[in-house]
Amino acid sequence: MIIIKNPTKVKDTFDMAMERTGIDQQMDKCVEEMAELTQGIMKARSMGVAFSHNVFEEMAHVRLSLDLLEYWLPDNSDRISKIYNKRIDDWYEFERRLDPKAGDHS
């Protein structure tokens, strides 16, 4: 999980970006960042490593892009959270079916 050391700075940065650009430009930027992450992962895998500094950097860029889009669409934050949590629940159940001992914290 990401630890944000200065939440006010993040909010201020997102506000400035919102004033300077539109949602379409930020969505394009998010697509670009996701493509760069994909390229970074593929390059790292071709070199026989799971991750590289570039992959971590692109993961941060993608996360920031997604966070910015969510910040711009606050009315949809709850909707995104519900879908996210549903996906986690489904994934958890899938993993439990594959390994019934998984998730047993006793």
Image: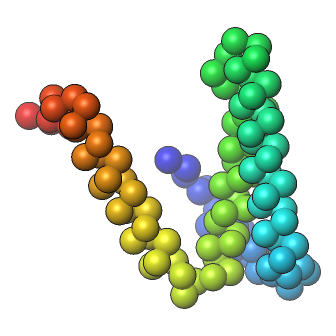
Answer left or right for 72 relative to 13.
left
Answer left or right for 85 relative to 60.
left
| Location of residue 5 by image quarter | bottom right
The reply to whether residue 84 is in sight is yes
Q: How many marks?
A: 0
Q: In the image, residue 73 lies at what x, y percent?
A: 63, 82
Q: In the image, residue 72 lies at what x, y percent?
A: 68, 80
Answer left or right for 30 relative to 66.
right
Q: Is residue 48 above or below residue 42?
A: above
- Nearest to the observer: residue 6 or residue 81: 81
Q: Residue at x 67, y 16 (%)?
A: 49
Q: Residue at x 64, y 65 (%)?
A: 67
Q: Residue at x 35, y 47 (%)?
A: 91
- Nearest to the observer: residue 92 or residue 2: 92
Q: Residue at x 70, y 59 (%)?
A: 64
| Location of residue 26 by image quarter | bottom right
> Which residue of the protein is positioned furthest toward the right in this rendering?
20
Q: In the image, residue 77 lies at what x, y percent?
A: 51, 77
Q: Is residue 1 above or below residue 41?
A: below
- Color style of the picture: rainbow
The reply to whether residue 16 is in sight is no
- Nearest to the observer: residue 71 or residue 28: 28
| Location of residue 45 by image quarter | top right
> Which residue of the protein is positioned furthest toward the left in this rendering?
106
Q: Is residue 5 above or below residue 91?
A: below
Q: Is residue 59 above or below residue 71?
A: above
- The C terminus - image quarter: top left
